[in-house]
Image (cartoon, rainbow, N blue to C red):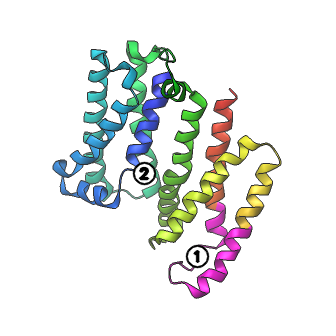
């Protein structure tokens, strides 16, 4: 489980914060366009598997993950146009990426032990709770952003793109929500109240700013953000206290 957690984190970093709009557009050009993204995935996974790069099997598994990511992303692009549910297609895509990483448990490196602590770097690397926190923060913030977009398309037919302000506001909001279950029972309702209050203030900004779409401060939008932020936060709390 130790290395699995770090490879999942590497996948989240490469698939979300490091997958810029330019990288995403490149993927539409075919296999060649997907390669830069796959190289970023491979680099992130190599970086987070650094104590074990002396093992030949580690390189074999990293190459397998890179190849499977390349093939899956190509198939996703080909099939995406025929998908009736954007949310289900997006969810299954991420689930399949994680499933390929779980193949690590079919090999000897699935039960690999943490490296011996030799300084601050290995102490940081060996901290499972910190690795889980980073993973779930990305899942709640960036991944939550795309999950909300696809849900709005499927259920309400809303395809209006987020402005930069709305995107980063939502990402920051869900990071706070994700952390709130870890801060105690009082923190959660207080955080939710603060989120609703802050979103209501966006209405004032909306009247004077073209950066904000009409439905951004709606109850629906706020509830969706709370759902994904608190949902991933609850899952994180469970895993940490398991």
Mark linked to residue 230: none
Residue 224 appears in which quarter of the rendering?
bottom right
Tell me: 203 left or right of 165: right
Vertical placement of 163 versus 174: above or below?
below
Specify the farthest residue to the top: 108
Where does the image place residue 130, in percent across and percent down from the top left?
Answer: 58, 34
Q: Is residue 220 magenta-colored? A: yes
- Residue located 57% across and 62% down the image: 170
The reply to whether residue 25 is visible in this rendering is yes
Where does the image place residue 78, in percent across and percent down from the top left?
Answer: 25, 52
Where does the image place residue 43, in percent across and percent down from the top left?
Answer: 31, 37
The residue where tag 2 is placed is 17
Label 2 SS: loop
Vertical placement of 14 versus 165: above or below?
above
Tell me: 202 left or right of 80: right
Tell which of 60 and 117 is nearer to you.
117
Label 1 SS: loop
Specify the farthest residue to the front: 119
Going from the N terminus, do you reach mark 1 or mark 2 first? 2
Tell me: 113 left or right of 38: right
Q: Is residue 198 magenta-colored? A: yes
Crowding at dot 2, Cα within 10 Å, few <14 / some 14-19 / many 20+, comes out as few
Which secondary structure type mostly characterizes the magenta part of the structure?
Answer: helix
The residue where tag 1 is placed is 215
Where does the image place residue 100, in percent across and percent down from the top left?
Answer: 37, 31
For the record, the magenta segment spans 197-223
């Amino acid at each position: 489980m130790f290395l699995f957690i770090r490879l999942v984190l590497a996948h989240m970093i490469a698939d979300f914060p490091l997958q810029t709009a330019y990288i995403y557009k490149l993927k539409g050009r075919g296999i060649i366009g997907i390669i830069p993204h796959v190289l970023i995935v491979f680099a992130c996974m190599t970086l987070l598997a650094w104590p074990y790069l002396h093992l030949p099997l580690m390189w074999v598994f990293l190459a397998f993950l890179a190849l499977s990511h390349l093939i899956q992303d190509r198939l996703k692009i080909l099939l995406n146009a025929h998908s009736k549910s954007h949310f289900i297609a997006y969810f299954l895509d991420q689930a399949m990426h994680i499933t390929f990483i779980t193949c690590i448990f079919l090999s000897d490196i699935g039960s690999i032990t943490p490296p011996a602590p030799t300084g601050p770097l290995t102490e940081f690397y060996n901290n499972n709770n910190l690795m889980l926190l980073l993973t779930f923060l990305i899942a709640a913030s960036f991944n939550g952003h795309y999950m909300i977009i696809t849900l709005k398309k499927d259920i309400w037919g809303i395809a209006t793109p987020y402005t930069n302000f709305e995107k980063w506001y939502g990402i920051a909001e869900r990071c706070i929500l994700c952390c709130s279950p870890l801060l105690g029972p009082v923190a959660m309702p207080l955080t939710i109240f603060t989120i609703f209050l802050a979103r209501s203030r966006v209405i004032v900004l909306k009247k004077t700013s073209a950066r904000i779409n009409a439905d951004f401060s709606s109850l629906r939008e706020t509830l969706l953000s709370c759902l994904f932020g608190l949902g991933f936060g609850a899952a994180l709390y469970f895993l940490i206290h398991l």
